[in-house]
Image: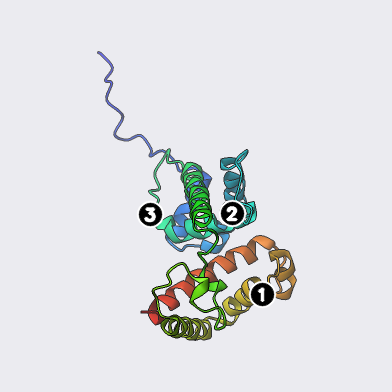
Amino acid sequence: MTASNDPDPKSPPVPLSSTLRHVKAVQEEHDADVSWSNLHDKMVRWVAEATHGQNLPTDKSLDDLTQEVLLQVFRDIGEFKVEPGASFSGWVRMVAGRKLNDYWRRARAKKRGGGKLKHLGDFDETGGRERFADDKVPRQSMLVRYQELQESLQRALGELSDKHKRVIELRLFQGKSFAEIMPLLGYTKEVTVRSLHMRALQRLQELMARFVD
């Protein structure tokens, strides 16, 4: 009797790799913190490998890039299709490459603008419209918009949990490193602080979207 070339319908499914199992756990919010911690160090390494030998703009560091990539991955991880053979590392490397390209695109745009284009954080009430590229926007309307954003930020911060609010204050407003924040929040692992920080930023962005027109 000739053996059939058809696959055995009773053959067991191909098991997922440990990395994909952690990705699935994060997507399904099942022990998500533990799984995210297990993915963290791998993703940091993948970002470094994806950008090895490539230059960064002078105002950016590898740590800046890594944090932006991790935050992007955290926001979009639900879009990654978990299936046997899928490459999560390749997906993270792709995100890193796009972020790096964005860095250089903004750097070139800033250079073409003679350094006049500023971010919101560069604006203050005494800066006036001279600090923005678009001089057609009335100064008063900019001040009003800035004040509205400030108020929205304060309202959003007020709705954060105490730990989320604290990690944002320490990291963004006081400029402390994750290693410095760790003992202040009672943690023993830096990766836990990084995970908390990313979750806090995501929640802050969700709240800001409600308050900002």
The quarter in which the C terminus is drawn is: bottom left
Rendered position, 28 above or below 87:
below
Residue corresponding to mark 3: 79
Residue at 56% x, 72% y: name it: 122
Query: Is 179 located above or below residue 212 in the figure?
Result: above
Q: Secondary structure at mark 2?
A: helix
What is the x, y in percent for residue 46? 57, 44
Image colouring: rainbow
Q: Residues within 10 Å of mark 1 (few under 14, many from 20)?
A: some
Q: Tell me the element at label 3.
A: helix
Q: Quadrant of residue 33?
A: bottom right
Q: Earlier in the sequence, mark 2 or mark 1?
A: 2
Q: How crowded is the residue under tag 2: few (<14 C-alpha within 10 Å), some, or many (20+)?
A: some
What amino acid type is highlighted by mark number 2? Thr
Q: Amino acid at mark 1?
A: Leu
Residues marked 3 and 1 touching at CB (< 8 Å): no
> Which residue lies under the disc numbered 2?
66
Disc 2 from disc 3: Cα separation: 20 Å
Which residue corresponds to mark 1?
170
Residue nearest the observer in this picture, 189 or 3: 189
Residue 56 position within the rendered picture, expressed as x and y whole percent measured from the top left: 60, 48
Query: In the image, residue 103 lies at what x, y percent?
Result: 52, 53
Residue at screen point 58% across, 79% down: 165
Disc ID at residue 7:
none
Mark-to-mark CA distance, 2 and 1: 19 Å
- Which residue is depicted at the point 48% across and 58% down? 72
Judged from this view, the residue extending furthest toward the top is: 1
